[in-house]
Image (cartoon, rainbow, N blue to C red):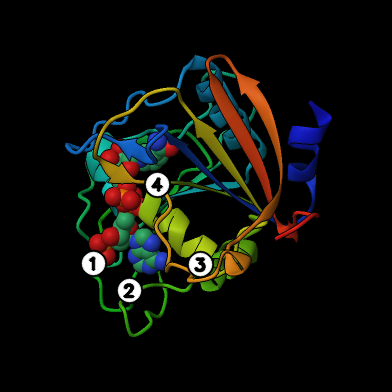
Amino acid sequence: MLSLYGPLLEENVAIGQLGQSLDGHIATCTGASHYVTGPESLINLHRLRALADAVVVGRATVEADDPQLTVRHVEGPNPLRVVIDVHGRIDDGARVFHGPAPGALRLTGIDTPPLPGVESMALPLDGAGRIAPDAILRALAARGCRRVLIEGGGRIVSCFVAARALDRLHLAIAPLITGSGRSGLSLPGVADLGDAIRPDARHYPMGRDVLFDLDLRRRAEGPA
Ligand SMILES: NC(=O)c1ccc[n+]([C@@H]2O[C@H](COP(=O)([O-])OP(=O)(O)OC[C@H]3O[C@@H](n4cnc5c(N)ncnc54)[C@H](OP(=O)(O)O)[C@@H]3O)[C@@H](O)[C@H]2O)c1
């Protein structure tokens, strides 16, 4: 699958991923997300982790899933596991902080107290209390992480898409309808369809799911 994974072998690449229902939800309204998508999509996710130097998740994903963020369903190295927790709400019991090498990193605001036993890096916040995606990617590049997977949830991936900080997005769509739930992508709307993000796209069957591999650096050819 060189067309799918080849672009991720570039020197500097940021890729987002989300697995969602047909109606655009990445979890139920209670936050349950295991598993929106099927086993083939889970293997694809672990392959992305194995190709990444660092995998980044938002605070709400750690609270909902207590993920390990390690590579278990394919062979390959574990990435650095990065949690964005600007206010220091996640406690030191989270599994993500206790996995194998190369360990975990907590990205916080400047005034957030340290968490004993957990490596933290403080970065400046913007007026909305967010760390700019570019600043996150620069901080990770400075410690040698040049292939970065933004694994979720919807708010952090949306933040990276809105900032145009992603090169690619793997959007796995499962044939299920949850009715309501946690949103996948949520971005400022456009009035004109000509202003919609219309990336170059390929799609791949993943069991019962369909994976859209979106090249966010290239606009699709053809009529807008
Ligand atoms: N299906 C999937 O592919 C998938 C993948 C991952 C997670 N999930 C599910 O998604 C749900 C969580 O997703 P979510 O969208 O609610 O939340 P999320 O993206 O996991 O986390 C959002 C929080 O992370 C922090 N954050 C994110 N970007 C930031 C930035 N640029 N600067 C500073 N802080 C930032 C903020 O924390 P503060 O509020 O503390 O400021 C923000 O509220 C869970 O139910 C989980 O199970 C599904």
Residue drawn 17% across and 36% down?
Answer: 30
Mark 4, residue position: 184
Q: Amino acid at mark 3?
A: Ala
Q: Is residue 125 left or right of residue 211?
A: left
Mark 2, residue position: 109
Q: Is residue 118 left or right of residue 93?
A: right
Residue drawn 54% across and 70% down?
Answer: 192
Q: Position of residue 151 (x, y in %)?
A: 48, 44
Q: Amino acid at mark 1?
A: His
Of callouts 2 and 4, the N-terminal one: 2
In front: label 1 or label 3: 3
Q: Is residue 187 left or right of residue 16?
A: left
Classify mark 1: residues with Cα within 10 Å, few (<14), some (14-19) or many (20+).
Answer: some
When the figure is inspected, residue 207 is found, relative to residue 204, above or below; the finding is above
Of callouts 3 and 4, the N-terminal one: 3
Question: Where is the C terminus found, in terms of image quarters?
Answer: bottom right
Question: Where is the N terminus found, in terms of image quarters?
Answer: top right
In front: label 4 or label 1: 4
- The answer to whether the residue labelled 1 contacts the one labelled 2, judged by CB atoms less than 8 Å apart, is yes
Of callouts 1 and 2, the N-terminal one: 1
Mark 1, residue position: 87
The kind of secondary structure element at disc 4 is loop
- The answer to whether the residue labelled 1 contacts the one labelled 3, judged by CB atoms less than 8 Å apart, is no
Q: Amino acid at mark 4?
A: Gly
Q: Is mark 1 within 8 Å of ligand 1?
A: yes
Residue drawn 47% across and 74% down?
Answer: 132
